[in-house]
Amino acid sequence: MPTPTSIDPRHAQHHQKVPRVEVYWTTVTYKTVILYSLVALGVVFGGMYLAKPELYSAVINKIHRTVGNADVDPVNADQKHAKFVNLDGRVQIKKFNSVQWVDATLSTALDKGDLVETGSDGDARISFADGTSYTIKPDTLITVEENSTESNRPTSVTVSIQTGAVDLATPYLRSPDSKAAVKSEDATTQLHSNSRAAVKFDPEKKESEVVVSSGTAQVQRGEEKIDLVQYEKATIPSTGAIQKSTVLKPPELVEPLNLAPIIAENPKTATVHFEWKPVPEAASYRLRVSATSMLTRNIVDKKNITGTSVDVTGLETGDYFWNVMATDAKKESSELGDIFRFSLVAQGKSQDMILEITGYQLHGRVAEIIGKTEPGAALIVNGQPVPNIAADGTFRHFTEPLEPGQHSIVVVGQNRRGGTGHAQVSIVVPK
């Protein structure tokens, strides 16, 4: 068989009219590209080193820092920001590098130098990465002064008040050198571990006030320092020495229990009984019931109560928060004490559901609740939903960490027929 002869288009005869497209290419390997790139970079850096050695050093240091920090977790870096955990009403912020005020959201991250302002109906709670929280009261303007929460060194968080009031609460601070503070004018209030205080500042009078509701704090202005313990107040005038005094203790709440459900056939006409322990120095009390955890837009606001209990009707089905403040004969009021939460639940009109607590176990300060209900039912334990219920209706639920002492664990539920159930058990958490 004759072998086909390849035709070189460059030597083809003129009488051949077949159209052709000539394509030429050169194969370049990745190694060649990388080699040429390195040579080019070497020329650039060599010229930079000869012309401007200081610029060369700066660029090399920047590259070194970037490469050296390549393993930084972006999530952990984001956790160093302060964030809003509660927002109610009008709350606006102005970033330190902006001239525009914008509405705050729960996804807004706060940095050093940012401004936060609340309106007359506004309330906000800010949480820092170390667990410190600041509750900003209505008609308040603050600046985030400091936010240093590195894990390998003492933390330091501070806000300053231009006008208004702020509540500051601290967790356990892992280092004695850690700082959580509020500045007002030329005074600084620093809280210690597991403490809470309210700080107010009047810019017209240039006067500050600090009240410690738990733990300890120190107020400093210049060389003057005042230590405060629970239920003590420091008044810081524009001139003169800081004055220290005692304040009225807030009442201890009794009923409804925190996170307890109240089941009624008709919640609108049901009577809800509120009760608290007496404060010896109190002349009257004020009861507030709200649908928000920061007690804004109160549904019930009863003042000048002379007894230690009140019955309330007319509440709709839902979750509520309540608190009582005491007032003495001088019209001085106690600070905000504990805020309890309860749920008003409508009794199912059909057959009640099966619900029982069969046992519990303590794991440190966490209680494991074991029980049985109907398949497909919805359960709430101390205000927290039970995510996993087995096909046969058995369930296990772990509570939040409980303080030492006696606790009433309450379980409420509803089945698919609209029936409701209620069960509770008393647990003692040892010290």
Image: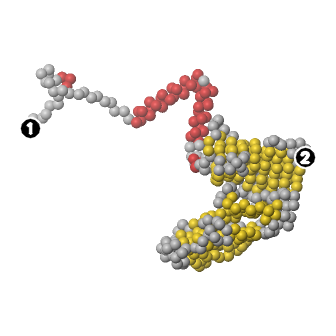
Label 2: element kind: loop
**Which residue is the site of mark 2?**
241
Which residue is located at x 81 percent, y 51 percent? 210
What is the CA distance from the residue labelled 1 to the residue labelled 2? 118 Å
The spot of residue 403 in percent (x, y) is 71, 67
Of the numbered discs 1 and 2, the one sitting upstream in the chain is 1
Name the image quarter holding residue 63: top right
Residue 429 shows in the view: no
Viewed as shown, does residue 281 lie left or right of 73?
Answer: right
Instruction: In this rendered view, identify the residue nearer to me: 418 or 179.
Output: 418
Q: Residue furthest top?
A: 14
Classify residue 185 by image quadrant: top right
Q: Amino acid at mark 2?
A: Ala
Residue bearing mark 1: 1
Q: Looking at the image, which residue is at 61% across and 76% down? A: 423
Q: Is residue 212 above or below residue 201?
A: below
Q: Nearer the viewer, residue 196 or 43?
A: 196
Residue 325 image position (x, y, % from top left) = 78, 61
Question: Which residue sits furthest left?
Answer: 1
- Please tell me whether residue 181 is drawn above or below residue 95 in the rendered image: below
| Residue type at the position of mark 1 | Met
